[in-house]
Image: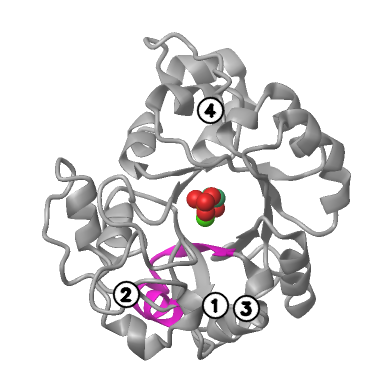
Amino acid sequence: MTGRPLPVPPADIGLVALAALTGAVHQSRIADMIIIGHRGAAGHAPEHTVASWDLALDMRADYLEQDLQMTADGHLVVMHDDTLDRTARGEGCRGPVIRKTLAELRGCDAGTWFNDSFPDRARAAYAEQRIPTLDDVFARYAGRARFYIETKNPEDAPGMEEALIAALTRHDLRPRGNGDMRVIIQSFSTASLRRVHDLDPDLPLVQLFRARETSGTIRRRLDDYVGLVHGIGPQYEDVDDRLVEEAHRRGFVIHPYTVNDTAVMRALIARRVDGMFTDFPDRLATLLAR
Ligand code: G3P
Ligand code: CA
């Protein structure tokens, strides 16, 4: 899609000056703003691997993002694409994830594609990186990270929401009441969010919106999500002042994706968003002086 440029504050305006310009409420929003490590720190390391999530935490991400896919034998694995072709290497490591068993996926290498695609960014061989299950992620990070989990293509994987709730239960990550923000569930599918809500109404939900939407098309539907979601996740180019204002008026947080350019981060901070998905958590952490 063609990018619609966001108005960018002058590059020499620091955050302190920006906060002074925009008032106390904005200062508190900056303090509360969350850094969502998109697929970990996917700008620096192969997405959805331990290498990427470890780095995101080192870079002060508040949340680690995961995209869920389901295997042929009903296991939840963390992978963005519904096929193995882009980010997996090894014998038999091609084709739809949903047609592979977990045992088949365990042999795939999830790291070396990054070395080939981004040789300038690769700082390690990454050959040891494997496709993680959601259980693997929880076992490694529960207690020291928060999770921002997307049900990906849930219409193609019946039972994904039940499997997700079961994994949260196994790792004692179900909310301990309304307001427990250790886990946020996101989806482009409202039906999937409703299923999650039916299974556990205390889980905070975020409705994602496709890049083809606009501020206007999103605003017209905001009332549909009242009582269901904690917030909305639009593509960053769709965020304008009216969308932020109308989201906040309904009590929603707004977390644009996927923001990698520092100037755009500054513009979105000035617009008073509540957090951002980024492949470069270090850039946003530096802007927020963390
Ligand atoms: O989940 C927010 C953002 O990640 C949505 O886009 O395609 O990167 O999952 P995608
Ligand atoms: Ca995602």
Q: Nearer the viewer, mark 3 or mark 2?
A: 2
Mark-to-mark CA distance, 2 and 4: 41 Å
Residue 269: mark: 4
Color scheme of the displayed model: one colour
Give the residue type at disc 1: Leu
Horizontal and vertical percent position of residue 111: 23, 63
142 relative position to 239: left or right = left
Mark-to-mark CA distance, 4 and 3: 34 Å
Disc 3 crowd rating (10 Å Cα; few below 14, some 14-19, many 20+) is many
Q: Are marks 2 and 4 in contact (CB under 8 Å)?
A: no
Q: Give SS at disc 2.
A: loop
Give the residue type at disc 2: Cys
Q: From which residue to which does the magenta span run?
A: 134-152
Beta carbon of the mark 1 residue lies under 8 A of ligand 2: no
66 relative position to 189: left or right = left
Disc on the earlier residue, 2 or 1: 2
Disc on the earlier residue, 3 or 2: 2
Question: Which residue is disc 2 drawn over?
Answer: 93
Q: Nearer the viewer, mark 1 or mark 3?
A: 3
- Residue at 76% in and 70% down: 197
Horizontal and vertical percent position of residue 222: 82, 43
Residue 173: mark: 1
- Residue at 17% in and 72% down: 128
Image quadrant holding the N terminus, namely top right
Question: Which residue is disc 3 drawn over?
Answer: 160
Residue 290: in sight, yes or no? Answer: no
Q: Quadrant of residue 288?
A: top left
